[in-house]
Amino acid sequence: MEPFQYRGGRLAVEQVPLDEIAETYGTPVYVYSSAGVVDRYRAYADAFNGVDTMVCYGVKANSNTALLRLLAKEGAGADIVSRGELRRALAAGVSPDRIVFSGVGKTGEELAEALDAGILQFNLESVAELEVLSAIAAAERKTAAIAFRVNPDVDARTHAKITTGKKENKFGVPIAEAMALYAQAAAMPGIRPVAVAVHIGSQLTSLAPYERAFRKVLKLGLALREEGHDIQRLDFGGGLGISYGKERAPTPAEYARMVKKVIKGQGFGLMIEPGRSIVGNAGVLLTRVIFKKPGHGQAFAIVDAAMNDLIRPTLYEAEHQIVPVRASNARKRERVEIVGPICESADFLGKRRMMSPLAAGDLLAIRSAGAYGAVMASTYNSRPLVPEVLVSGSRHAAVRPRQSLEQLLALDSIPPWLEA
């Protein structure tokens, strides 16, 4: 389903016009569709119907606790990468036995807290991490169920900053070393190997790299079973892309057909960890034009959102669709740069866009902003964090309030020797 549609010339989310959201909560503001999130989660659950599959939402895509609660009510698990995400998932009602802890740099304190919480699985990425977890588990007389995240040296053919499955990336252990590592882990106290994990990148729009990586993981899983390891499941990670406008991303159904073809009833349970593809297109960032400024060959529309609110265009050269909240019948189009007020040339939200002429006060929606938007925001230039609003039908609520300048300043403190 498409949760954002024009109705009577006004862009709406479900049953709520976005200009009403802007009027109620101000701008900039993130807006999420409950129906959009649930629809995408169910698309995965339905696509893997009949296969023993746990869908663990990739929390790092958007960790707002209200969204986690929404997904937990649908039966989703959680793929976490920090202690903070663990606590968010638990606070949202995700059962510990549906949580998997990924990430390349888990601290001893994080591992201990997750072990105490009774999570389902640790995805380990080094021998050093294995040794720390074993020591903690043995001291507490507990057993940690683990997988090694293997690096299959498969090029995901995505942006260099979000590819993770090549041998030069920091993630995972070389797949060629995995057999020895599993043997080492099985002999260590407090450790029980139960799975093999892989994650080759983010925003993949081709299934071919997945298939190459998954066939390598399946082969490894079968070899480990032959060696006597009780490998119960294969963790295929996340990373399925979305359409930001030009791309054609595979659907969950197409992805599931490929996975089923690969595993061919070999008796493994599955874990998948979609993030962006669940929440990405279920969110927008609303922003208002402050000024219109002429430039060389194009106009500048200076808006009240900035790179600190949505860093993807600056960090990843990402192109989000930007559309007017009130539809225009004007045939005239102009080339415009959509830029923010931060004192950086890198502060842009859209380059060289052909749009109907804009004016101060116009409201714009930056689409596909539900993933890696608010969760990556900062307070650069002392700009407070913007609110997040969740919509369900005709209902809406702030699920994170706008940070005030007073709250922002209160985070700092003056040391005693500077008080005078």
Image (tube, helix red, strand yellow):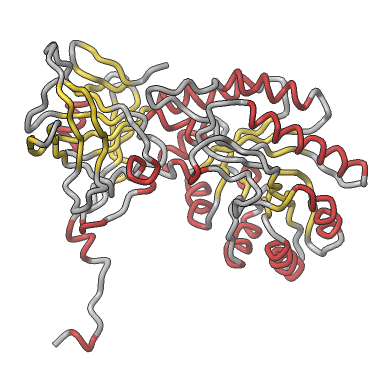
Picture coordinates of residue 192 (x, y %)?
A: 80, 53
Identified at 33% across, 49% down, the residue is: 377
- Picture quadrant of residue 153: top right
Identified at 53% across, 57% down, the residue is: 83
Q: Is residue 392 left or right of residue 410?
A: right
Q: Nearer the viewer, residue 245 or 193?
A: 245
Q: Nearer the viewer, residue 30 or 201?
A: 201
- Picture quadrant of residue 189: bottom right
Identified at 84% across, 60% down, the residue is: 184
Identified at 55% across, 48% down, the residue is: 80
Q: Nearer the viewer, residue 169 or 119?
A: 169
Q: Is residue 393 left or right of residue 138?
A: left
Picture coordinates of residue 342 (x, y %)?
A: 19, 51
Quadrant of the rendering where the N terminus is positioned: top left
Q: Is residue 163 left or right of residue 242?
A: right
Q: Is residue 186 left or right of residue 94?
A: right
Picture coordinates of residue 45 (x, y %)?
A: 60, 24
**281, above or below 9, in the image:** below
**116, above or below 318, in the image:** below
Picture coordinates of residue 409 (x, y %)?
A: 21, 64
